[in-house]
Image: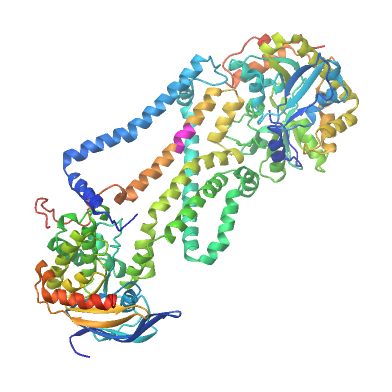
Amino acid sequence: MSVNELLQLDNVAKSFGSTVALEPTSLSIEDGSFVAIVGPSGCGKSTLFNVIAGLLKPDSGEVHVADQVVTGTSGHVGYMLQKDLLMPWRTVEDNITMAARLTRGVTPEDRAEARRVAHQYGLGEFLRHYPHALSGGMRQRVAFMRTLVTRHPLLLLDEPFGALDAQTRLEMQQWLLQVWKEAQRTVLFITHDVDESIFLSDRVLVMSPRPGRIIADFANPLERPRSLDVLTDLRFVELKSQILHLLHGDS
Amino acid sequence: MKIRSTGALALASSLAAGSLAMLSLGGGASAASVTNVTFAYDFPGPDFELIPLVVAQDQGFFTRAGLNVKVVFPPDTSTTTKLLVTGAANIGFITTTDMGVAVNAGAPVLSIGNYTMSNNWALFAKPGVALSANNLKSELEGKKIFSYGDTWTESMLPFVLKKAGLTDKQVDIVTDPTGQDFKFLLDGKVNIATNTSNYEVAGFDTSGLKGKEPTLLGTAVGAPNIPIWVYATSKSYAKSNPKTVSAFMSAVKKGTLWAIANPAKAAVEFDKLYPKSGYTNAYNLDGWKLTIPFMANSSGQYFTQTSAQWATMSKALKSIKLISSVPSPSTYYTNKFLP
Amino acid sequence: MDSNSQDDSVSTVNLDSATASRGLGGFTRSRRRAVLRNVGIPILSIALLLLLWQAIVVVFHVAPYIAPRPLAAIQSVTDNWGALWPLVLGTVRETIYGFVCGTILGIGLGVVMAKAPFLHRMVYPVLVLSQGVPIIALGAPIVLILGFGIAPKVVIVAWIVFFPVTVNVVAGLSHVDQDLLNLARVYGASKWRTFFLIEIPASTTPLFAGLKIGATYAVTGAIIGELVSPSGAGGSLALYQEHANTNFNVAGVYGTTMVMTAIGISWFLLIVASEVVATPWQRRTVARRSLLHREPDVDLTSTGH
């Protein structure tokens, strides 16, 4: 195992009854990278995430995070879903510090960090707001900040922008890239949007269902920083067509 | 008036059946001259004090008087007077103190005849417990005294306490309109029960405690000696239907005298008409026999009211502030419908 | 509450109004109107009801011993306030004790039933059975067991209150977003912290729904308790009314009914008010500043996006 690999899966497999949700899968994710996973529904993306996060115990194989075996245990990743899962009874600030509250209690440092992050990423004046007062995009930003302040180097984002409208989603993608660059974290990002996977990532994994498995692993040739112009870049279009071909077969 | 009790009393069932139950006593009467009379009893279910009416029906005294009498039972003991003033019932059975508070409130009710002639309300203790007029204060002080919370008990208790030299703060008055006095007394939940002797003694008798009940008659410890129950009607009904009222009282008198002469048969007739009263024949017969001695005055008269009894009643209620003024006795009663 | 708004335009409107509400003038004006609407209209409707009552009694010449005029009923209360007040306190005490006992029992049973499906199946039929028992029929046995004091009334109030609380707590705990619970697991949260920080707060709305149902019946329960179980020294509000009734004091009967109603409404409003205090997020867009943790005020003009 190389020193700069943050996450390593060794032949991790998971079945539910007779359904193979995830074939034996091995995978290495480099520290600091942004890896996108695309695939149709039922391809085992979420099972893969749940195994990494420790919500599911794999039938076989091992999960290593930062050279530690964490198979079947939790508390070592940041995790974010399409649903923002903000607690309506908590303010923005209290939602951001939720992980600390749930595990060890909130310290003044946690609060200071939550405020700093919120101010840095445009939610400074909404710290005392309740979630219902925020727009969908803002709520996802709060959910992401909550994931960020866990200080875990590995963040699992499961279609975080899937419920947003196209305009807001574009804004959020650019915002995420900025935060990722500044926060220096490793991101595993599930999406069904091929454009999104290419725009954001260093590497795109393509998954296929029945049985769930990784069928392709593309290095993203686009250099950073990226503007919206890359969407029309030839290399972008080429990669997109390869991925689409894999996803939709001969059609 | 709620002075009813027995260990075997099925109050819940009689409540359920009695609030709406209307039992026709009119039978086969179908002559053109028949007058319908609705009679309201004072209790939610039938018991032995209804025997004179039962006999008047069963022996045909009502039918021969041209009356078709329907007996109704009120949802609670304070409603009978209201049934009379609203016209829902024509003639009813209430207490003299009910008359007192109703007239004081301006309700046009009129008493048309006594049921009993004297006050047999009394205090009772558990068998074996001393109860005498001599040590009244020590026997009542700090004790739990049962009250039905009705006007009669509320009117009588203050006189007893006054006689004992106690205030109502020095005793614990347990008020229970559902009437479990006998049960509470035997269970030791209360020290003193209050009730009329015909009901409470019948309860002791039929519970195998005959003659063992420590009794203290209210009139021996300060309570005024006034009749307890009366037949009453509204002033407007009395004015518009004098013949009906007279015929009713006449038939009731025949029923009363017959039941006094034939108590056992009368009790059987009661059971026949009210097989689900919740009482045993032994209790009904015993209770009725215990009622009889109070029905005639010292001159052997039945039903006859006096101005003195009403004056005593109203002065007594005024003295305990239950009524605001003492009206003329004639406001309460008339004897003109008596046979 | 849907934590995942799909409709950004609506949320954005919320956001705008949230920002606007911080402007002081608009806030107080809308607040004053809300107070007028929420307090003024109910008072007006009650006044109209009393007026209608007075009109019916006067126009149809209803005798005072059948139905009193509202003023006479109110006067019967004010004239006898010295005697009534201790009884009111007694009923309030029975209501509070019974409500608290019923609530604790209700929450406890609700939690146990939500957490243990086996016990849920065991206990639920018994709960339903308990609510099928006519409370009136409980009077005699409860008195023989518990005597004449406050205990039987408290038991009857608790008996009435616990059921809606239990049902709503079970429903609330069973419907906590499973994804949120999974997220807590991913973070490595303990069961206890998850329970107190997520499951309990997520169930506050259904809990208060149950408490409000319980509150509407609690005072009725106390009055039923006073009717079916005798009261020792001092009496009770229900007996006071019973006495007024037997003594042909019709104004007193109506007046006592008004007092009982006032206690019932006050208790309900108190529960509603405690819900408002306990769930600020239901009505406020911005949390009140707490004294414990202050953050620097932010200049509204420099929005960061």
Q: Position of residue B42 (x, y in %)?
A: 70, 27
Q: Residue at x 77, y 36 (%)?
A: B277
Which of the image's four quarters has the C terminus of chain B? Answer: top right
Most foreground residue, A188 or C35: A188
Residue C67, position as x, y percentages in the image:
54, 21
Kindly indicate the quadrant of the structure image that contains residue B321. top right
Residue drawn at x 68%, y 45% is B188
Q: Does residue B275 sit above or below C120 in this rendering? A: above
Q: Is residue C225 left or right of residue B135?
A: left
Q: Is residue C263 magenta?
A: yes
x, y percent for residue C63? 56, 16
Q: Which residues are magenta?
A: C259-264
Q: From the viewer's perspective, is residue A143 above or below residue C104?
A: below
Query: Which residue is nearer to you in this view: A18 or C253?
Result: A18
Q: Is residue A142 visible?
A: yes
Q: How is the image coloured?
A: rainbow
Magenta stretch prevailing secondary structure: helix
Image quadrant where one finds the N terminus of chain B: top right
Q: Nearer the viewer, residue A51 or C271?
A: A51
Q: Quadrant of residue B220?
A: top right
Question: How far across and how far down the image is residue B278, in percent?
Answer: 77, 39
C201 vs C114, left or right, is: left
Residue C291 sits above or below residue A31 on the image: above
Above or below: residue B125 compared with residue A223: above
Q: Is residue B191 magenta?
A: no
Nearest the camera: C186 or B310?
Answer: C186
Left or right of C260 in this view: B55: right
Determine the image quadrant of residue B66.
top right
Q: Residue furthest bottom?
A: A1
Can you see residue C287? no
